[in-house]
Image (cartoon, rainbow, N blue to C red):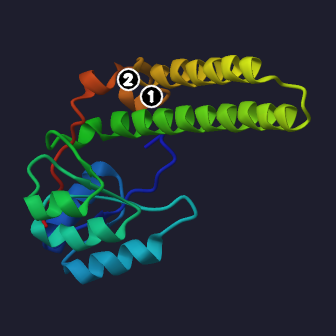
Amino acid sequence: MGLGLSPTLLTGDRPERARRVGEALGIPWRASMLPADKVRAVREEHGADGSAMVGDGVNDAPVLAAADVGIALGSASDLTARAGNVRLASDRLDRLPVVICLSRHAHARIRTCLAWTFAFNGAGVGLAAAGLLGPVFAAVAMLVSSLTVILLASGAGKPVEAADPALGGARSTPRSTGLTTAAPAGG
């Protein structure tokens, strides 16, 4: 897949259909699963980096809630959408890598902003406690710190160059992705 993920198809469908879809995608599959079986499988497969689940049916709600990141497709029922953390605008799974790239980019941007904030404010508090930073200069420094974080954060909406060849070098922004995906095979 190129994103460092290990996807597995977990479905309530019959084995014949799950095998066809799994082989077409080149991923492992498990069929005839009840919602509790899916929850157990996600908990067993939970890696150091966490787990994610994409679903659309009411029977997917428990596993979306159990996964670290639950992604409900656009056609998902209201219950399923509420159980997940993310609701996509459509059912096109081929756009899911763009969503993953965008979320990774936003997460990195947030970490950069937090690091800058802690470093700048830590230095400011230390200098103020030592009596080396007057109130007027402290206020100006705080303004500069806040503006820097705002400028860093504003980059979160700029185009992200997808590093994954599976995306065909596509550029994407939160507006242009439509946050879209495709429906899984059945249940």
Q: Is residue 186 visible?
A: no
Location of residue 56 in the rendering, given as x and y in whole percent from the top left corner: 15, 58
Q: Which quadrant of the figure has residue 128?
A: top right
Numbered marks: total: 2
Furthest residue to the front? Answer: 135
Type of amino acid at the residue the image marks with label 1: Pro
Type of amino acid at the residue the image marks with label 2: Gly
Q: Is residue 53 visible?
A: yes
Q: Which quadrant of the figure has residue 139?
A: top right
Nearest the eye: 64 or 181? 64
Q: Is residue 184 above or below residue 39?
A: above
Is 167 left or right of 130, judged from the image as shown? left
SS at mark 1 in the image: helix
Q: Residues within 10 Å of mark 1 (few under 14, many from 20)?
A: few
Location of residue 43 in the rendering, given as x and y in whole percent from the top left corner: 42, 76
Which residue is label 1 attached to?
Answer: 165
Nearest the eye: 117 or 48? 117
Location of residue 83 in the rendering, given as x and y in whole percent from the top left corner: 23, 64
Which residue is label 2 attached to?
Answer: 168
Nearest the eye: 66 or 42? 66
Q: Is residue 52 above or below residue 169?
A: below
Q: Which quadrant of the figure has residue 165?
A: top left
What residue is at 25 percent from the left and 83 percent from the top? 36
Q: Is residue 181 above or below residue 45?
A: above
Q: Are marks 1 and 2 in contact (CB under 8 Å)?
A: yes
What residue is at 73 percent from the left and 30 percent from the top? 120
Measure the C-alpha gap from mark 1 to mark 2.
5 Å
Quadrant position of the C terminus in the picture: bottom left
What residue is at 34 percent from the left and 37 percent from the top? 99
What residue is at 45 percent from the left and 25 percent from the top? 156
SS at mark 2 in the image: loop
